[in-house]
Amino acid sequence: MNMQQELPASTVSSVVANIVAEHVDEIFAVMGNGNAYFLDALAGREDVRITTLRHETATVASADSYYRISRKVAAASTTFGPGYTNAITSIAEAVCSRTPMVMIVGGPPTSGLRPWDVEQGVLAEAVGAISLTIEAERVTEITELAFARARAERLPVILSIPFDLAKTSVQVSKTRQPLPPAAVVPEASAAELTKLVSMISQARRPLLLAGRGAALAAEPLGQVADQIGALTASSAPARGTFAGREWDLGVCGGFASEASSALIAQADLVLAVGVALNQFTTAFGSQFAETATLVQVDIHQRATTPRVDQFIQADAAHFSTQLLERLVEVAPPTQRWEGAAEHARSSQLNFERPIGEGLAADGRLDPRSAMHALNRILPAERQVVSDGGHFIGWSSYYFELPQPDALTMVGTQFQSIGLGLPSAAGAARARPEATTIVVSGDGGGLMGISDLDSLVRVAKSAAVIIFNDACYGAEIHQYGSQGLDEQVMEIEPVNFAQMAQGMRATGVEVHSMEDLAQVQRWVEDGAHGTILIDLHISRSIIAPYIVEIIEKTLKK
């Protein structure tokens, strides 16, 4: 007789906690009525660490950045109702970024909604997330299913524990229900590879373009580039993928230097691996030559733009290995690009940027000068966490990155600002040995300032750079230039350095290049703890990518 042996009774929350601890070693949380018993069941365990945040949106944002850097499925937790709705923007971003995570939340009781409850499942599905609700008779099965679906579908899963079940006793069987089969990793077919190799053999100026989806395939993709004589480039979020390669052009698209962009536009074959080919990577469709053949390789089911000539559904790492095996008999060219790209070799082509003269015409700091200096001053062992806003151009243009996933841009996919500081604790947990550099504007910084406290608590070494121009810069430049009223786009001057000191960080105000000596001293003293660098920059200096957006807008 096949009988299931039952263990002593446990609470619903403790059963969920036990299974969560089997799948993750990190969870980001804000406690409330709805998740109190769940977090209590996790507290004190050695196999999972609870990182507490200050705002619910930071729980998901930090879990998102933790996954992007560590590639480990992460978990987040909030209470029901307002705790859950506070995290919706971060959930939507995680959906856009295809981030697998499980968010354990308190849920309405099984008896129905109370005045402070919302239809949490409806909200989750409205932004594209998966929603599951714990049932007393299926606690183990549903919790396991949440992690299985998160991994298989690469989406955030909202796992709700109804309030009246949180401390209910249940019997747990030793025998687990079988999990759904793991998702099959798609791979390129023999016919697709044959066609691609034929294209490659005819190309004279191939370009290999990598996105975040290719982060784990950097080495074999580099070998592919060497075999076919390709130059390399990456999307902005994937900067660092080809760090150190002598033929790398850096960022492709709106954040590319003029010299890099000019070479990219000469490619006759673009092999885009693990990259979405959005408007920024393609510079609104103007980055690649009209005659260039564009091949996209991605795990999604179809091409992300009609511009793609051949789409191959495949995992980046597996595809790279497959392609290398097929390229063994293809002799690499004696000269890359027939010598037309020789000036790019071992050059700093992607870092040839204007650096300004320190101060702009209005007497405020030139952000280009400040970033050029900070790139040299701040530790080379770094990772950059970027908020959204006009300033992302400066960090993308001037900061060198040491490796793949050394840049996280939580919020960019959903075009949100204010998620830089909320996501920073997750980055610091994922890569504690690096100095975490957070870049934000004054608008986004004010939105997320509560979780500066979280970064101070968890980071061994962190530098927060606030581009303080007393306005929402992207809006000022895009809409002020069209004659719209700028008053609603302006921000009363804020002293972020003083705010940082109130949260136990080192705060420095920077009005001139000489003031950066304070940052230099922090680095020389070991770069310990968190420093906030309050850059009082001029709003008169406009990032090139914003200029391009303005020009595209005016043409319409």
Image: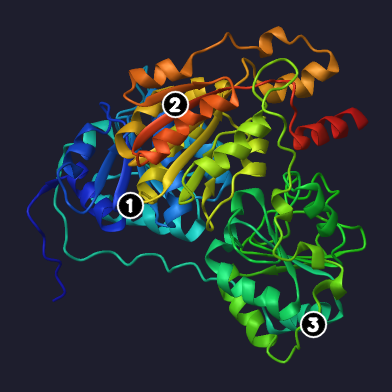
Residue 462 is drawn in which quadrant? top left
The quadrant the N terminus occupies is: bottom left
| Residue 28 in the figure: left or right of residue 60 | left
Point 55% across, 61% down: residue: 215
10 Å crowding of disc 1: few (<14), some (14-19), many (20+): many
Q: Quadrant of the C terminus?
A: top right
Residue at figure coordinates x 64%, y 16% from the top left: 471
**Type of the residue with mark 1:** Ile
According to the image, label 3 marks what residue? 333
Q: What residue is shown at x 42% (from left), y 55% (from top)?
A: 70
> Percent x, y for residue 304?
73, 54
Residue at the spot 82% in from the left edge and 55% down from the top edge: 306
Residue located beneath label 1 in the image: 142
Q: Is residue 555 above or below residue 332?
A: above
> Which numbered circle lies on residue 451?
none
Q: CA distance from mark 1 to mark 3?
A: 55 Å
Residue at disc 1, secondary structure: helix
Q: Amino acid at mark 2?
A: Asn
Q: Which numbered disc flags the more N-terminal residue, 2 or 3? A: 2
Q: Residues within 10 Å of mark 2 (few under 14, many from 20)?
A: some
| 1 vs 3, front mark | 3
- Label 2, label 3: how far apart the Cα atoms are: 55 Å
Task: Report x, y in % for residue 132.
Answer: 39, 45
**Of label 1 and label 2, which has the lower sequence position?**
2
Disc 3 marks which amino acid? Answer: Pro
Decide which of 517, 365 is in the foreground and name it.
517
Question: Which of pointers 1 and 3 lies earlier in the amino acid sequence?
Answer: 1
Residue annotated with mark 2: 86
Query: What is the spatial separation of the Cα atoms under label 1 and label 2, in whole angstroms?
Result: 25 Å
Label 2 SS? loop
Callout in the foreground (2, 3): 3
Q: Position of residue 220 (x, y in %)?
A: 59, 75
